[in-house]
Image: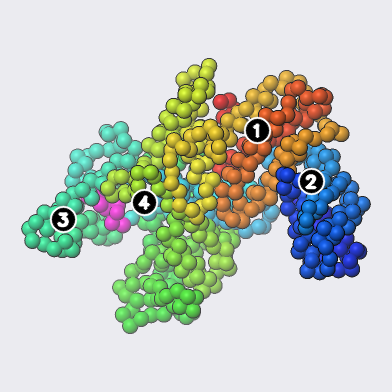
Amino acid sequence: MILQQTISGQVKEAIKELYNANLESVELQGTRKEFEGDITVVVFPMLRVVKGNPVQIGEAVGTYLVEHVEEITAFNVVKGFLNLVIADQYYLNFFTEIKDVEHYGFVTPREGDKAIMLEYSSPNTNKPLHLGHVRNNLLGYAVAEIIKASGKKVYKTQIINDRGIHICKSMVAWQKFGDGATPESTGLKGDKLVGNYYVKFDQEYKSEISELIASGKTEDEAKKEAPILMEAQEMLRKWEAGDEDVVKLWRTMNSWVYAGFDQTYKTLGVDFDSYYYESNTYLLGKDNIEEGLASGVFFKKEDGSVWCDLTDEGLDEKLVLRSDGTAVYMTQDIGTAIQRVKDNPDIGGMIYTVANEQDYHFKVLFLILKKLGYDWSRNLHHLSYGMVDLPSGKMKSREGTVVDADDLIVEMAETAGEISKELGKLEGYSEEEKNAVYKTIGLGALKYFILKVDPKKRILFNPSESVDFQGNTGPFIQYTYARIQAILRKADFDWSGLVKNITLDGREKELIKLLEMYPEIIQNAAKDLSPAIIANYTYDLVKGYNSFFQNVSIFGADSEAEKIFRVQLSGVVGATIKSAFGLLGVQVPERM
């Protein structure tokens, strides 16, 4: 911020002139609410270069600043803190500069800058998306939008895990028990239909294990020899060999799942620029391993397996190719990363949105790619996030105890509807209008509840707690936005003019200070890959606005200029709420 830079420079000049000393840096912070002032200079760090009483030093520097910085009108010193009072006109000038800026706080990417590829979602095709996927999708989408707003080009992508024993399990169960069922014949979304057969497989598998144990087999033997598992393993072998019938069934069932995923993505409001499929990428990486062997990055053991020695980095040796020449997940991930840069040569880094269970995997992957010498490997990040728990406990896909994403979204809308009815909101709306608002509130509550938490932290998600019209919740912020829109509709006069020379209420000044922070908030959220920074900033902005609304009369202002300014201020706050929530993928209703 320009004023802070000016103050820092003038403080250094003051110390040079008053004490003939050089100050390397100046510590500034917002003035605490109990003291008069807007910006505080912390005097204590200056004692390293200036000997003396911190209060006297503060007084001397304060006097110098009032004389040399026209925006500073007064000061006071509390112990080692120099509190500076900034002229109202500074805030009015700043407000005038931003009030009509369409995408205030956003930075346009510069020509030639490197792009970021951000991977998120990446589901398996044997089950529908669940609550864990919801956090992944919301995080990935929000971080991509925030990075875009910070001034970088972003490619959103995912890799779909569409091959392996898990999908073969669903395929075998559908063949044995499906009786030709399709999404059309059952009325089920394709991902749900296929997921039901994954659960059915597990039920049958457990039943067969019990029978084998009863016949005298050990538990380990029973798990390996269960007929239905052996059928799935045989199907996987046929798939890898390109068996026509197996591949045809695989394509059919996967197409059902993709159609189901697309519906869920659309409802969640997330999107992708490209898709990668493991069935296409699982052979990638082998050539890169050969190159790494030749350059000494990898080494071969006596059995023919290939490894990477990471002991110098405090890790262990990592297998990258089995002795029979087949790939492991690490091989595929190496190859896929390299392929993505070939597909998009302007990529300068990648971000992987994957749960914290994979922290070690990504540490190893990034180290190997660095050893292979790729420039972009210096800009690889794992957006690691904690699990989402429910009051009822942990979720398990194969047992069918997961919280289905679609069901959760419906439940959120229903909960929003029940609470809205109890509070008497939306009176006079048609049923169709009410349902649309309930969906917006419910989805907003879900997204905000998840995104306001630092990604690294585990979440205990309680649907009814998230749909609350008070406190740090999505609905509270949405309701404030709707209130602002009602004020703007009520303002039936021309409020577009330039406002000068009015005295600002302290709450108005606080709101402008918060608006001034927005560009920096976006940059910090992009740097930290944390939508929580945006979410909690928006909550602070809304709290500040509600304090202003409750204590300062908008339409009963003493002068026409003040009335116009307060409507303008409301408009800019509303636009900033909408902008910030847009970065989180949350919609705001015009009426509530």
Precedes in sequence: disc 1 or disc 2: 2
Does the segment drawn in magenta span residue 172? Answer: yes
Image quarter where the C terminus lies is top right
Choose mark 4 or mark 2, whichever is in front: 2
Q: Which residues are magenta?
A: 164-173
Choose mark 1 or mark 3, whichever is in front: 1
Determine the CA span between mark 4 and mark 1. 45 Å
Please tell me the numbered disc located at residue 209: 3
Please tell me the numbered disc located at residue 103: none
Q: Which residue is mark 1?
A: 546
Precedes in sequence: disc 4 or disc 2: 2
* Badge 1 element: helix
- Disc 3 marks a residue whose amino acid type is Ile
Query: Could you tell me if the residues under marks 4 and 2 are in contact, i.e. CB atoms within 8 Å?
Result: no
Residue extending farthest to the bottom is 302
Counting from the top left corner in percent of width and height, residue 374 is at: 55, 69
